[in-house]
Amino acid sequence: MIGSKTWVIAEGYIPESSTGPAPTMTSHETACILNAGDSAAWIELTIYWSDREPSGPYHVEVPPRRTKHFRFNDLPIPHGTDYACVIRSSVPVVVQHTRLDSRQAANALMTTIAHPVDA
Amino acid sequence: MIGSKTWVIAEGYIPESSTGPAPTMTSHETACILNAGDSAAWIELTIYWSDREPSGPYHVEVPPRRTKHFRFNDLPIPHGTDYACVIRSSVPVVVQHTRLDSRQAANALMTTIAHPVDA
Amino acid sequence: MIGSKTWVIAEGYIPESSTGPAPTMTSHETACILNAGDSAAWIELTIYWSDREPSGPYHVEVPPRRTKHFRFNDLPIPHGTDYACVIRSSVPVVVQHTRLDSRQAANALMTTIAHPVDA
Amino acid sequence: MIGSKTWVIAEGYIPESSTGPAPTMTSHETACILNAGDSAAWIELTIYWSDREPSGPYHVEVPPRRTKHFRFNDLPIPHGTDYACVIRSSVPVVVQHTRLDSRQAANALMTTIAHPVDA
């Protein structure tokens, strides 16, 4: 049983523009989820905002022994807007957060393991 | 109750120049704070320097179920100067640290979950 | 005994192209492993995919009191493909994950300490 | 007492070239250390290599209530060479690792909180 059932990403922000071919060079944010266990992970994502009540939860499934690199761009999140995310899973998973920002001529990247919350 | 009440960012440095439109492309550092709980978070930021006594504490409030992406540029921190920050909150929160550096033609990004200190 | 015996990298992706001289500027991902102990570390890497069963384990040895910056490019991982990795070691080690992305004119970097799994 | 007395950076690499004015835009790596306590921190840095016995320890002092952003460039570390670092302090501190890589036209940045080792 590898990981935690709750994870937090505090820094969410999808840049408003992009340079380069879609979809690989489109400015985006991902929650990369690894489910190394033998049961499917039923996952709920709740999105927090600076100025209104949270949205969601949105649902994602990660099959056993699979990774899913989920793009926040696929949720109804306006670009250029601050947000944060709490991720709750039915089984332990590991979550890593990444942003690709291609607003300027060369892309920028950032990543961090998300913050695990003990059960 | 998600998170910790004390967090540390050891690497603080606001670049001295910027390329691109303000405020989005202005070189900046943020403490992205998520308060996922149902009580307001009263937060104190203390700034540490390499060569003088600490400054602050400075105060920030994050309402219940809200995120605040706080720019260190809004504090009296000289640019081009090494600093660090201890963040103390009245309730558990999660803190992520990000820098956007646009001194050169294309911006650079970096992020990390800050260091949580157990109660 | 410094570190953990199991580590997770959830965000794996080797960019499909590169700008600049090989091998230093080739787009790549690394698992930087430090074995600060006095016994050799026998390490197994298991690669997880989004749409098929895991591959491996692949084997790496890190001698006592040595670091190895292992390139995932040296494994049979197709470029431009989402993956994740679980790293299991015979002795405690520390793992840090880095990507250099040189698809566009100037390279982008990202790093994070991998997620340690308690024994 | 904020932090840990032992920290690990597994990914060390000082790029071999730079673009832009020294010292700010010189390719470099730093261990950003915060000593939030009221006693001086006496710190030992041990450098690990891929192919030879460790070097050091090298000594750094961080006064009480001060941060020091220590450049690995100031140690006898050859550029373009893989290394790792174990940091031991007489009192608890927090360590964050950063690299600025300016080999190409626009700089790249990466950061992570180092790996704390429990006492």
Image: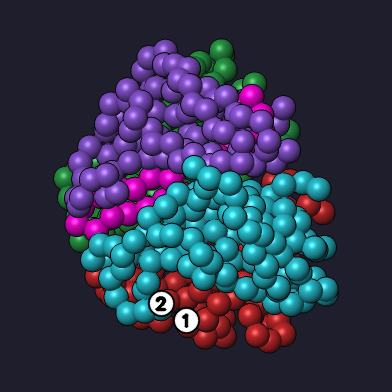
Chain colours: A green, B red, C purple, D cyan
Characterize the magenta stretch by its predominant secondary structure: strand
User: Is the residue under label 1 in contact with that under label 2 (CB below 8 Å)?
Assistant: yes
Q: Residue at x 43, y 66 (%)?
A: D28
- Tell me the crowding category of disc 2: few under 14, some 14 to 19, or many 20 or more residues within 10 angstroms, Cα based: few
| Image-based side of B117 in relation to B24, left or right | right
Q: Residue at x 70, y 41 (%)?
A: C2
| Image-based side of A101 in relation to B33, left or right | left
**In the rendering, at what x and y percent does residue D105 appear?**
23, 66
The number of callouts visible is: 2
Instruction: Decide which of B58, D108 is in the foreground and name it.
Output: D108
What residue would you read off at disc 2?
Answer: D24
Q: Which residues are magenta?
A: C89-116
Q: Secondary structure at mark 2?
A: loop
Residue A28 is at least partly visible in this image: yes
Q: Residue at x 72, y 47 (%)?
A: D117
Q: Is residue B101 above or below residue A35?
A: below
Which residue type does callout 1 highlight? Answer: Gly
Q: Residue furthest left?
A: A21
Q: Are marks 2 and 1 on the same chain?
A: no
Q: Secondary structure at mark 1?
A: loop
Q: Quadrant of residue D97?
A: bottom right
- Disc assigned to residue A8: none
Which residue type does callout 2 highlight? Answer: Thr
**In the rendering, at what x and y percent does residue A68 appear?**
42, 28
Measured in 3D between alpha carbons, the distance from the residue under mark 2 to the one under mark 1, in whole angstroms, is 9 Å
Instruction: Decide which of B76, C2 is in the foreground and name it.
Output: C2
- The chain to which mark 1 is attached is B
- The chain to which mark 2 is attached is D
User: Comparing marks 2 and 1, which lies closer to the viewer?
Assistant: 2
Q: Residue furthest front?
A: D52
What residue would you read off at disc 1?
Answer: B80
